[in-house]
Amino acid sequence: MLPPAPYRAGLQASYDDGDWFAILLEDIDGGHPDSADPGDRLRVFEAVWQQTV
């Protein structure tokens, strides 16, 4: 399981019966990034980069 991070929703619950699985994530404010906005693209890049270090 991934540790908590400010750039992703927290895992609230999960279910796995061997054939199907489901996850319940916390509700967070916000929306999808605007790929036409350089600032949004930079924030997405930074969030992805943080997951590699």
Image (spheres, rainbow, N blue to C red):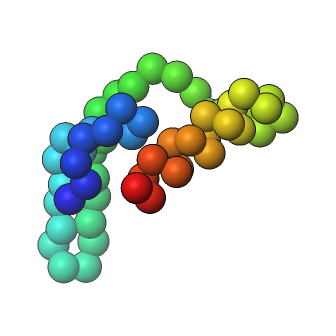
Q: Nearer the viewer, residue 37 or 42?
A: 42
* Residue drawn at point x = 56 percent, y = 41 percent: 46
Q: Which quadrant would residue 20 be assigned to in this image?
A: bottom left
Q: Nearer the viewer, residue 24 or 32?
A: 32
* Residue drawn at point x = 19 percent, y = 54 percent: 14
Q: Residue 41 location, x and y as percent?
A: 71, 38
**In this picture, residue 4 sits left or right of residue 45:** left
* Residue drawn at point x = 20 percent, y = 59 percent: 1
> What quarter of the picture does the C terminus occupy?
bottom left
Q: Residue 33 location, x and y as percent?
A: 66, 33
Residue that extends furthest to the right in the rendered view of this protein = 36
**In this picture, residue 43 sits left or right of residue 22:** right
Q: Residue 49 location, x and y as percent?
A: 52, 51
Residue that extends furthest to the bottom in the rendered view of this protein = 18
* Residue drawn at point x = 26 percent, y = 66 percent: 21
Residue that extends furthest to the front in the rendered view of this protein = 53
Q: How many numbered tags mark residues here?
A: 0
Q: Residue 16 location, x and y as percent?
A: 18, 68
- Residue 53 vertical position relative to residue 29 in the rendered view, above or below: below
Q: Nearer the viewer, residue 11 or 5?
A: 5
Q: Which quadrant would residue 5 be assigned to in this image?
A: top left
Q: Nearer the viewer, residue 25 or 51?
A: 51
